[in-house]
């Protein structure tokens, strides 16, 4: 009876915590515009809950391995963002999402050998890829409020994100830790937000979203690296507490960078 009760409790947490995180982030994105929206979406809204529930369901060792794979998955998201940004300016959102999706899959497959490396080295590779991707991204939209979104968009995001967390944690015993960790970095919420913004505000808005995503992923990579390195020696609660503090610090720095860049773009346009 105890295992059943514990399973029900964890499932209830998945169904409550995940949509609350995604809903709050989405509302913030609506208020502060596409660039800050991308930064918010890049928080570990899916990978964080996946890592937590894997630790509770499968144990710290499984969660550590999955979190390391998620660190590597940041590199695949960089490829996704660059693919979408490049295609968005030459075609519609359909072409952009197809290009980005193929890029993500190819990168995820190519990353398999890296999963055998120490998590510290994987983190360094992810940071280098994020920095290079941010430099390669074209300039996006300025920091401005987003256009009005349809009423059904927010519930859809919450439902999709929660579905991903529940499905991945349920399938983890079959998928294994590495595959579960990589799939936790599927850019589901970023995809939804980029496509809706692209349709509503054009390719510039979508590029702004994705630029914010890459900037915010430095914090997510740090969060996941801390979880991977500390969940076994420290335990679940201390490891995730330390990871939350880490991502908060890194995200504040990333937010300051975004605001400075946004102010620079606005000043440049005014001068022109």
Image (tube, rainbow, N blue to C red):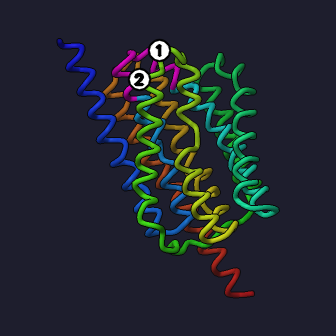
Q: Secondary structure at mark 2?
A: helix
Residue where numbered disc 2 is placed: 54
* Magenta span: 52-66
Q: Nearer the viewer, residue 127 or 160?
A: 160
Residue 44 lies left or right of residue 23; in this view the side is right
Residue drawn at point x = 76 percent, y = 54 percent: 95
Q: Residue 136 lies in what quarter of the image? A: bottom right
Q: Residue at (72%, 43%) from the top-left corner?
A: 79
Q: Is residue 27 left or right of residue 83?
A: left
The overriding secondary structure of the stretch rendered in magenta is helix
Q: Is residue 68 visible?
A: yes
Q: Which residue does the image show at 23% across and 27% down from the upper left?
A: 9
The x and y percentages for residue 88 are: 75, 60
Q: Residue furthest bottom?
A: 271
Determine if the magenta segment contains residue 54: yes
Residue 145, position in %: x, y?
Answer: 50, 74
Residue 143, label in figure:
none
Q: Which mark is residue 173?
A: 1
């Amino acid at each position: 009876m105890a295992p059943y009760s514990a399973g029900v409790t964890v499932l209830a947490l998945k169904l409550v915590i995940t949509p609350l995180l995604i809903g709050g982030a989405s509302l913030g994105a609506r208020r502060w515009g596409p660039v800050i929206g991308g930064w918010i979406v890049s928080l570990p809204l899916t990978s964080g809950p996946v890592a937590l529930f894997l630790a509770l369901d499968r144990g710290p060792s499984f969660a550590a391995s999955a979190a390391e794979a998620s660190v590597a998955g940041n590199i695949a998201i960089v490829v996704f963002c660059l693919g979408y940004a490049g295609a968005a300016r030459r075609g519609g959102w359909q072409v952009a999402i197809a290009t980005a999706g193929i890029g993500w899959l190819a990168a995820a497959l190519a990353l398999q050998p890296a999963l055998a490396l120490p998590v510290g080295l994987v983190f360094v590779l992810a940071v280098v890829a994020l920095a290079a991707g941010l430099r390669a991204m074209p300039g996006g939209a300025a920091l401005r409020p987003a256009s009005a979104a349809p009423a059904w968009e927010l519930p859809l995001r919450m439902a999709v994100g929660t579905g991903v967390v529940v499905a991945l944690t349920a399938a983890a015993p079959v998928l294994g830790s590495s595959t579960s960790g990589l799939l936790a970095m599927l850019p589901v919420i970023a995809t939804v937000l980029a496509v809706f913004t692209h349709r509503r505000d054009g390719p510039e808005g979508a590029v702004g979203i994705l630029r914010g995503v890459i900037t915010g992923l430095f914090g997510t990579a740090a969060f996941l690296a801390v979880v991977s390195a500390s969940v076994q020696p420290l335990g679940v609660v201390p490891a995730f507490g330390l990871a939350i503090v880490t991502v908060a610090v890194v995200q504040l720095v990333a937010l300051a960078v975004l605001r400075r860049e946004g102010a620079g773009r606005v000043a440049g346009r005014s001068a022109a």
